[in-house]
Every structure is written in C-alpha cells, then in structure tokens.
Amino acid sequence: MNELIGRKVMKKELNTDIDISSAIQLPAMKEYGDKIECGRCGMKHLKAFVQLSQNFYFCPSCIQFGRVDSQEIFYHLPETQIVPREVLFIWQGQLTDGQQEVSQNLRTIITKNRNGMIWAVTGAGKTEMLFHAIYEALEEGKRVGLASPRVDVCLELYPRIQEVFPEEPIALLHGKSEIPYNYTKLVICTTHQLLRFYQAFDLLIIDEVDAFPYVNEQILHIGAQNALKETASLIYLTATPTKELLQKQKINELETIILPARYHRRKLPVPKLKWCFQWRKAINQGKIPKQMLSLLHLLMKKNNVLLFCPSIIVLEKLYTLMKKQLPDGMVAAVHSKDEERAEKVMRMRKNEFRLFLTTTILERGVTFDQVSVMVLGAEHRVFTESALVQIAGRVDRKMIHTNGEVWFVHDGQTREVKNSIRQIQQMNKLAEEQGLVDELCLL
C-alpha cells in the first residue's frame, strides 16, 4: 500500500498484488459542458476532439505516461503524519558568507511555509546551499522532493545527496529508470514524474526551473502544484529567472534570495564578441572561417574548448572539418541523439578531448575543468538570453583559476546577445557592491 501514499495512479500502473480496497478513488476525468478535464495533468480539451466512442474520452496532453481516459480511476492514499526523527547528516563542507546567508534565508522561508526563489549565478554552489534546509525538513518528519526538468541533473544530484545522507533511502525517478517505485521521505525526480504525485511533499525544490521542457509546458507546472500538500513550500532554483518568476517576485508571491557571486570570489567571465561574416556559408562550402579558426588556436593554447553549435547539422559539418585540422582523438562532438553522449561527456571531464563540439544540450548541468567556451552563430534563435548566460557559466567554475574565456562568434548581434552580456555585467556589479568578489583572488 505504500505505493499509493502521496500518489495518484491508475490500477494498470500498480503491481498486481497491491490491495486497493482502502484507497481513495478519484475520477480520471471530469466533464464540464463541452469540455473534459484530465485528473492527472489538469488540461482541458473539447470533447469533440478527444472522443473515443460515445461518452468515452482520453487525454492527449499526458499520453506519454500511459493513456488516461474517462473509464479509468485514480487510486490515492494520503501522506502519513509528520513525525520528527533522527537523520544522519555528514556533510563536512563549509559555506561562504554569501552561501550561508542564502541557506539561512531559505530555511526561514520554509519554516513559514512560504514559496521562494533562489536566484544564484551559475557555479554559485546551489546544491550545497540546500543541504541544511533538506536536513532540517527531514528531521522534522517532512517529505522532501528535489526535481529538475533534465535527467542529467537528477543523475548528478543523486550521488551528491546520497553521500550527505548515507542512511536515507532515496527514490530516483525518471523516464529511463527500471527500478520499481518505493515510498521514501526523500525523492529526486524529473519534473515529469511529479504528475504521478498528489499532495505528497511538504518541501518541493525545483532546480533549473527556467530549463526546457518545464519552462514552457503548463502540465508540468500543474503537476508540481498538485504534488504539494496544502501547507508546503515550493522553492525554485535558477540562474536565469523567467519574466513570470520575476513578476511573482514583484508582487511578493515569491520570497527571492539573490546570490550574484561564485564561491571562489571571482567575477563571472564576461563574453567577448567576434564578428564572423557569413560563417554558415563558409562551413557549407567546406571551409572553417579564418576568424574562428585563429581564435580557436589561441584559446586552445591555454585551455580545452567547449564549442556550442546552433544545430546538429552545423555541428556535424564542423566536426568533419575540425577532424582534418586536429590530431586523432583531440576532437569530439555530442548532441541529443548521440547514443554515446554520457560516455563522451565523461571523457571530456577527464580532459581526453581538446575540442568538444556540442549543441545546447550541454548549456547547463555539467562542469568541466580547464575550459574556454565559444558559441558559433550566437545570433541564432536557439541561443536565447537564458541559454547564453548558462553557456557562459560553463567557464571558471572551479576553485583553481585557468584563465578561461567566453566568446560569442556571430554574424550580427541580437537583443538576446546584448541582454545576456548585460545580465552578467549586472550580476558582477551587484557582487562587487556586496563585497562578494575580489579580483585579486586568483586561487
């Protein structure tokens, strides 16, 4: 029966031997005149477009999780009572003054059952700032969820959280997981998985809240809200808040904590611009633009280079050209359809490649030592302000300073390019005003 606690699932999603006789039954769909509403994702559709047969309807919005239709029933059991308990917490790290202030303010927000947002620059150490808040919530007997739109982020968070709470059972839930679901007080999952929870969490933290697909899929926002208990805290983590989040901050729906500096007290690298006239035409003709190639050679004298391309087509053409320029094994490429993606990323972390071509799949959630970044075609629509800020944030994330640089190679500046540079400069200015950076601190 534990499988139903804080969940809302159909019988076909459960193990066959589970007793559902005492479970609360909830309708899978509700009718409102000429519309039908899904009980899982909350989306409404005109009956005429989702009708399977007479008085029989389905939901197309969340069908990737298995079909919900008007003949189904959801089964649910309420969360158990909150009972304080002892939790082993063994983190021995130290927070900077800025991180400590964020951690303390976060715990205050949670104590008041308020919603909040941590707006911290890339590489600020957001995960470490969560540890004490998670620990206090678990000790109070609360159920805690830590969600992200990206599987990669969940897979990276899991061992870090497990190391800090070594005796705590942790559920790791994502679309590729083959481990059966079991009830735990601490859950790490993708935001899609929240659609199967119902009034479950006392504390729900959503990392990378501005990332695809959470940022533009309404059903994921509904799923997050449904996963919360009535008295709960929802905490957003972001380095690039959306206009909607900033509006909520403005009207005091979100208590916002801003951390404009990284733990190593160096300013964020400000992107530099390199105009490259008709770069796409040159690549299509089988040539690497001279301006770009000379810049690459300069950057590679100091660091490895992470080169972002606007599309898989551009990436593959450029990769073919680069293999002719560099010795065997020095260059690699990765994109969303690459089956060896995880292995290549791991090899890049081990400094096996001098040049690593990628699409925006690596704009966030990964850290590499000793890299500079180049964005080819920064004017392309795929490179939004948020994406460019995140990409720039791949540089200088570690304590050891490596003189990493960020370059936007473009064929005409866009508003997104200008705004991303302005945002980074504003954060550096704020960090300086708060005494959180020291340009002489090159550790």
Image (cartoon, rainbow, N blue to C red):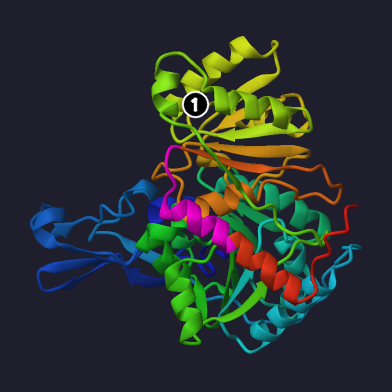
Crowding at mark 1 (Cα within 10 Å: few <14, some 14-19, many 20+)? many
Name the residue nearer the viewer: 198 or 113: 113
Which residue does the numbered mark 1 point to in the structure image?
Answer: 315
Which residue does the image show at 75% across and 50% down from the upper left?
397
Q: Is residue 218 visible?
A: yes
Which x, y percent locates residue 341?
59, 30
State which region is magenta.
Answer: 411-423
Which residue does the image show at 47% across and 72% down from the upper left?
245
Which residue does the image show at 52% across and 66% down from the upper left?
241
Task: Look at the image and say whether residue 357 sits in the magenta stretch.
Answer: no
Which x, y percent locates residue 28?
30, 64
The quadrant where residue 136 appears: bottom right
Which x, y percent locates residue 52?
14, 51
The quadrant where residue 347 appears: top right
Query: In the rendered image of this protein, does residue 337 appear above or below residue 363?
Result: above
Which x, y percent locates residue 364?
60, 48
Name the residue nearer the viewer: 257 or 10: 257
